[in-house]
Structures are given as C-alpha cells and as structure tokens.
Amino acid sequence: MTDLEAELRRAVRGDVGFDVTSRALVTMDASNYRRVPRGVVAPRDADDVAAVLEVCRAHGVPVVPRGAGTSIAGQATGTGVVLDFTRYLNRLIALDPVARTAVVQPGLVLDRLQEAAAPHGLRFGPDPATHSRCTLGGMIGNNSCGSHSVAWGTTADSVRELSVVTARGRRLRLGREWAGAPDGLRPLVEGELARLRTGFPELPRRISGYALDALLPEKGADVARSFCGSEGTLAVLTEAVVDLVEAPRARALAVLGYADESAAAEAAAGLLPYRPLTVEGMAADLVPSAAELPRGAAWLFVETGGESAARARARAEAIVRAADVVDAAVVTDPAGQRALWRIREDASGTATRMPDGSEAWPGWEDCAVPPARLGAYLRDFRALLAAHGLRGTPYGHFGDGCIHVRIDFDLLTDTGIARFRRFSEELADLVVAHGGSLSGEHGDGQARAELLPRMYGEEMVALFARAKTVWDPDDLLNPGMLVRPAPLDAGLRFSVLPREPVDVAFGYPGDHGDFSAAVRRCVGVAKCRTTTATGPAVMCPSFRATGREEHSTRGRARLLHEMLAGELVTDGWRSPEVRDALDLCLSCKGCRSDCPVEVDMATYKAEFLHHHYAGRRRPAAHYSMGRLPLWLRWAARTRAAPLLNTLAAVGPLGRVAKRLGGIAPERDIPRLATEPFGRWWRRRGRAMTTGAAADGGELVVLWPDTFTEYLSPSVGRAAVRVLEAAGLRVALPPTLRMRGRPVGDARSRSAAALLTARRDRVCCGLTYISTGQLDHARVVLRRTLELMEPVLETDAPVVVLEPSCAAALRGDLPELLHDDPRAARLAARVLTLAETLERHAPGWRPPRLDRPAVGQTHCHQHAVLGDTADRRLREAAGLTGDLSGGCCGLAGNFGFEPGHFEVSRACAEEQLLPSVREAPSGAVVLADGFSCRTQLEQLAGVRGRHLAEVLAEGLDGREGPDGEEGRRRR
C-alpha cells in the first residue's frame, strides 16, 4: 500500500480503491482519451471531499471529479485520484414545489430528480439524451443542455446556488452578486470588463471556455453561473440548489420530414417563434427503420406543450402548417412519442457506426453556430469532411444550432491521427467563421481546449488561465483541461490496443473478426447504467441489482479493454479482475439489442471463459450444468430419472449433490421428466396425428432442445398438438448421422444404414457456450450440422421452443462456426413457435382464450429473436396485457451457481415477480423459457407455462382446423 492510499484510507470514511479493477473502470469516459489514475475515492460527504483534497495536495496528486463518466471530451479522466460521486453523494436532499427549487448532491441521476418533481407538475429543464444515467454534478460541470434547451436553456440557466470545496480546502457557497467568490476573482474581472463584454459570441449554445461574462455587473455577477461548465477545474461541487420549471400537462410531437439534412437545418430557426419545446434534427442514415416516420430523408422532432392535449396538438398542427415539409405527422400518444424519442436518444450510440459498419468517433461532437447559419454551416462542414476523405452523420439540436456528429477518424495509425489533427484545426476555424462555439454542449475537455485560442484569441485564453489560478493556484484540479491543455491527439485510448488481431474462437462478423474492434464498440454512453428498466428493455440487470460499475456492460468492456492493453491488467486472459467482473454477467444478451452499438457481452464472456480456463480446472458448475446435455442423456438412457429425483429430494443427499455440482445451496434441483419428450414421440408414433397433419400438411421440424426433452416434455407435447392443429406435419431431427436418409419420423428405416450410422442427438450447444467451453461447443455443433444435413436439403423450418436455444442457433452457431456454411443455413431456418404459425399456417386461428396474461418476455427473445410474432399470436388468442421486460435472473446456469442467488433474486424482483403478484384474477402466467419457469416456481411458487401449453389447453373441444369449432372461429 502506497503512502497516498494509506493516508486516504485514514482520512476518508468513504470507499478508497487503488486496486486494478477500481482504476481500470475509470481510465476512460465516452471520449477518445485514456488516462490511468492512481486510485478512486467514493466520498460520503463534503468532509470526505475536503479530506481527499488535503491529502492529494500534500502529495502533489491531481484530483478529478467524475459523474456518470459519459463526458465526450475526456474531462472525466485523470492520472491522479478520481472522485466518484455516484455511490454515496447521490441524494435528493430537498424539493420545494412552492419555490420550485431542489437541493441535490452531485451524484444524483437526473431521472431521479425528474421522478421526484413530476408529481408536483415540475421538472428540471435541461435533459441530455443520457438523462437515465447522467448526474447533476456532471451536468453542472459541463453545462449540459439537452433537447429542451430551446425552451428551458442550459444547466447554467437552472442553477441558483452551488456549494463547493476549493483545492485548498475552502468551502464556498456560490451565488449572485459575488456570493462565494474566491479571493482575487472580483478584481480580476473588474480589471477586464471591456474584454469580457466583447469577447464572447452571442449564441444559445456557447459552452466553450469559462463563462467569465456571467460575472459582469449587468449580469448580476453570478458566481454560480460562471462556475457551470468549468469541467471540474476550479473547485469540487458538493451540493447544488437548482430551479425547476413547470412541466406542460400535455405534449404533442410533430415529426417533420424534409428532402435532406440541409433543408431541415434551414427550416429549424424559422420554427422558434412558435415557442416549441424542442427542435431536434436527424437524417435517415441514423434511423434503423424509417417505417414509423413520415416520408423524407431527414426529420425535425418538434415538441409542443399545452394545458390540454387538444391545445398541445393544436400548437403542433400550427407548426406543421407553417413548415414547408415533404410529409409530417403529429403524435399525441405518450407511448408513440417515447418510441420516437428513443430513436433520437439512441443516435449518440448509433452514430458510432457508419452505415457500412465501420467505426466513427467523437472529438467534434457538439459544435454550435447561430441557428440561422446552421444550414450554411452544415454545407461547409460536409465539404470539409469530403476534402479530408472523412464521413460523419450530423444530428442534434437544430433549433439551437448545435450539431452532434461522430466521424470515421482513423485513430489507430500515425497517418490517421495526423489527419484527425488537421481536420480539427480546420473545423475549429470553420466554426469560428460562422460565429460559433467549439463546444455547444459537452465541454472542451482535451478534445477542443487546445484550439480555444482560435475561438477566443490568446489574450482571452490567458485570462481563463488567470481565473483558474485564482480558484486553484496549485493546478490540482483536473489539470490539462481548458487551460494549459494536453494536445488533442495525445493519450488516445486506442494507442494501447494490440495492432494485430487477437486469436479468438468466435467470428465477430460485425467487427471483421477482430476482438479488439468488438471491445472498442463500447464508447461509454453508458445506457447500461440505467437504474430502472423501462418497457421491454433488459440491459443491464446485474448493474441494476448491485449498482456497481464493474457489473455494467460498460464496466466489463473497460476491463476487457485494459486486458488487451496489458498495462494495468497484466494477466491477459488469465486476469482474475476480468473474471470477477464477468462473473455476475447473466449472459442475458440484453446489451446486444439495448446497447446503441450492440455490445454483446454474453459472447465476450464466453470468449473470455474459453481462454481463461484453457488447460485449467474449471468451476464445478461448468462440469455439472455446462455439460448438462450429457448428464441428462445418460439419465434418460439408464432410466434413472425416478431414482435421481428421489435422491435429490432427500435433504442431506441433495445438499451433497449441490456441493459437488457447484449448485447454490439456496436452490432446489429441478426434477427430471420420467418420460423424455423423444420417448413419448416414439411411443406416440403416427396414431395421434390428424388427417391433415399426417397426409398433406407442410413439413416442420421440431427441435427437441435439452430442456424440453428432459425437463419440460409437456412443452414439446403441447407444441406438437398446436402445430398439427394448424395443419402442419411435424417431424423431429434425425438421430442417426448418415447422408441421404429421408426426414419424417426421426427413425432409420434402413438396416444397411443402421450398420454404418452413429446414433446422436442435435444440440444447440447453449450450456457449453455460456460456460465458455467453446471447443466442446464446436464439436457438438458440428455433429448437429451433420445430423441436420437432410433437413437442410429440404425447405422445412426448424421450430425451436426454448428461446435460449433458438437464440444460440440463430446467433451463436454462425458466429462460432463461421467457417462452415451449413451453420448460417441452419441459423436462417430457426423459427419460434409463433413465427412458424404466422409464416407457415397463416390461415389458422388460435383458440380464443380471452384471459389476461402476465409474465416476462424472455431476455434472449427480446435481444436476438424478437417477439413481434408472439405478440400478434397472443392478441389473436385473446391473451391481453403486455409482458414485462428485464431478466428473470436465473439465466440458465447463472442463478444456480454459488454466490449468485441474491443477484438472481434481485433481478426477478425488479419486474417479473411484481407482475405476477399484481396479476388480475384468472391471468395466465406465460414463461417460454425453462429458466423463467424455474425461477417463478422456486421464488414465487407459481407455475409459469409456455405459450404452446396455453394454446394446447385452449384446443379442448376443437375438432381441428376443419371441424365445426374451427370453422366457427374463422
């Protein structure tokens, strides 16, 4: 332990972390830069902040305040001690609805303030796209804005008083009329009044530099306002009094379609006289699907408010009439508005990938010009990009003249970095020529501070440095930012990554097979740090359960980045720090769909475990649950299921079995089916098929996954009944590996073939993949492809009932066997039950059940498969209500492993269990995944059912698709 660490531990009541993990998690923010800190402190109060500053000043170690770490210019990173306010200093201290003020701590997430203010009809005005995880302290440090700034301004416009601690330990209360000003600040300003009155451009989004003009007497000498946007370089914020605004009782969203981006930009300023709440712009290349948008190639999102829905809509319609548009739509439904706003908010991540999949980076993320000049500026900006052979997709706050853009800089080679510098210098000149600001929202940080003389001139920048010295004479706070800045092309986070591709098992097709590029996908926008799941979202359940950065998708990606860098995490694939961070990853794959850049941490975890345990002893759970198909097949062949069930139910024997198998003591061992699905299928033969199904129905191949086969055969039996009721002919995959055998009943009919064939079973490899046993998974999957060759020679779809297995076949199979064309062919055949019925039995109508349904959409279905067909099938069957999002928390082997039970239960308690407890009378509990059903049974004593089971029960009394009941239902 170093002297610095020891002294901090003695002086601070909060958490002090000088370990590898704590440091690795904060080496980066959402920018292009990387700095390795000495340590991290999570202070509990202002006294802790003062103690940290005192110790660090004595050691000459810099201090960097950090909010959610979503800063895009590098200002949330540092080489000294990083202060993390999100862990303890995160409370809403008071809210006064009469005065319309709130007292907040710097680590409070904006959405928590909004939730507290909403019952009073109030809100905090600024709302960046990161509102679900950004903190008030970070917003004050960057003077953040958000989409509603045309109505409510920047954070500085909403700040009343600030409590800060200076680098030398003074506690100041900043406000108007010089309140809290440090010694020397007022004389400095009063000696430069002329410069301050003429040296700042007049525009709504001028964030660059220090706001020293707020200290002018005619502006109230507002020290608090001047402090906003100082990026942690002047003092450390410990508390803030902020103003709230009245929220409109109703809102409407006018979506205006334009022929191109320039037309939308030029129209934006003309809409401001209508006093909209937002004027946001984006182009088609940032929209995954324009199906929900009006016709056009670019759009303005113009929100209006009013005392009533009719008034809000009338204002929106007035804007539509005034706008010269290609097409337009007015949306008043709150759910519809939220869906459209998600498209805009996800642009901060979506923009990190060009349409062809190549990478794009920040650095010139948020320049701002006068709104009236936005169209001209964008044309010049596009021309400058073309001149440098670069590409980018602008979007952002068109009503304020503020443009966000990620550009496909090559930040991996010396040539590319040199181009990055040249472009940056020329773009700075272009912005200034249009009367703009280098930063219009996210601050200067390292990305732009070096170029501030081009905007303000050398004398004004020298005045900034003098102001910094007044506040922080020892240059202790966030050095290298704003004044005396580090070069904009130094310390790039990519420079430490390996230049040659890393040898990996998965194919990473979206990243050209490069694991480093896959890890680079995480750009730090931190959507995974959302503390409450909304709607169908899943990501990131472990972070919501623990609240710790290392259990977020971003935190794990940061550790993988440092593992590849090898400077801080030095053990490579053997790293215990990376292993421990990944340990609580549920492999839910929520990040694959919910992360704007589609980080797939489940795949990265499997890859890591594959290398980490190569040639080493694995945890017992990897042998028991990771190789579950082997053990269950053995139990079925020996007909040992009844005996095993009996032994597992005997307390002492069950405890021993769990200990040996690496199963959490809190868990019950699931009972094995006494008659596996395949045995039932063989016993059943053709006797139970309907005429239509047996004689002329379209062939579908029903996949007997491990869970359906050995643990829940009732699901398979129900699916057969439903598929045949729909007029389809059901077959199982072959069980003998030989070529040319017909597909029909999964049994061989040739004595000669029996002599040369080998009996086997298809398997998706899920349990092997989730535990990182990728060599075994490849063997299993290649055998499966051999078995499935006769199926692949037909047009038959492959119906997979277990969502995790379907996701493994559709996603993991082609990525793991990327060199085998059969893998992609099989993946393309995989359908869920609902997709099969919709595509291959479109005329069939399910039985009308007319019951409410509760439960949870399986996380793998949400992330990989999609549930559109399932929702339509439930609606057709009269199953009303939406299923919840999130993750059940069991997640295959995860919830059964020792040490995971509490997190597993916390995940279930987030949405699944409350939805079941609050279910209306007579509701059916739907849970297509075996894990979800097991979690419900073990934690709530509730039996969840697969949709196939529910539909099969509804078929009672039906004569089949051509019977009287079937005709009546049609």
Image (cartoon, rainbow, N blue to C red):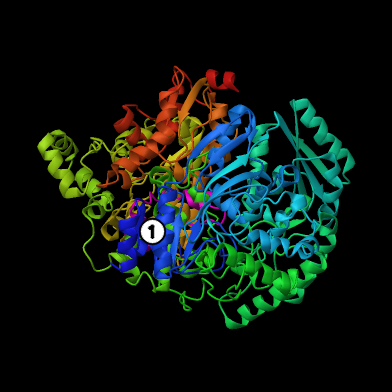
As drawn, 622 above or below 958: below
Range of residues picked out in magenta: 580-608
Which quadrant does the N terminus fall into?
A: bottom left
* Residue 753 lies in the magenta-colored region: no
Residue drawn at (68%, 52%), measured in percent from left and top? 287
Number of labels in the image equals: 1
Q: Which amino acid does label 1 sit on?
A: Lys
- Badge 1: few (under 14), some or many (20 or more) residues near its Cα, within 10 Å? many
Which percent across, then down, holds residue 316? Answer: 80, 36
Given residues 24 and 117, the one toward you in this image is 117
Which percent across, then down, holds residue 143? Answer: 64, 53
Residue 202 picture quarter:
bottom right
Residue 420 picture quarter:
bottom right
Secondary structure, mark 1, is helix
As drawn, 659 above or below 187: above
Residue drawn at (36%, 34%), measured in percent from left and top? 933
Is 636 positioned to the left or the right of 538 in the image? left
Given residues 261 and 778, the one toward you in this image is 261
Which percent across, then down, holds residue 706? Answer: 32, 45
Which percent across, then down, holds residue 437? Answer: 74, 62
Given residues 879 and 294, the one toward you in this image is 294
As drawn, 918 above or below 579: above
Given residues 294 and 838, the one toward you in this image is 294
Residue at numbered disc 1: 605
Residue drawn at (53%, 30%), measured in percent from left and top? 882
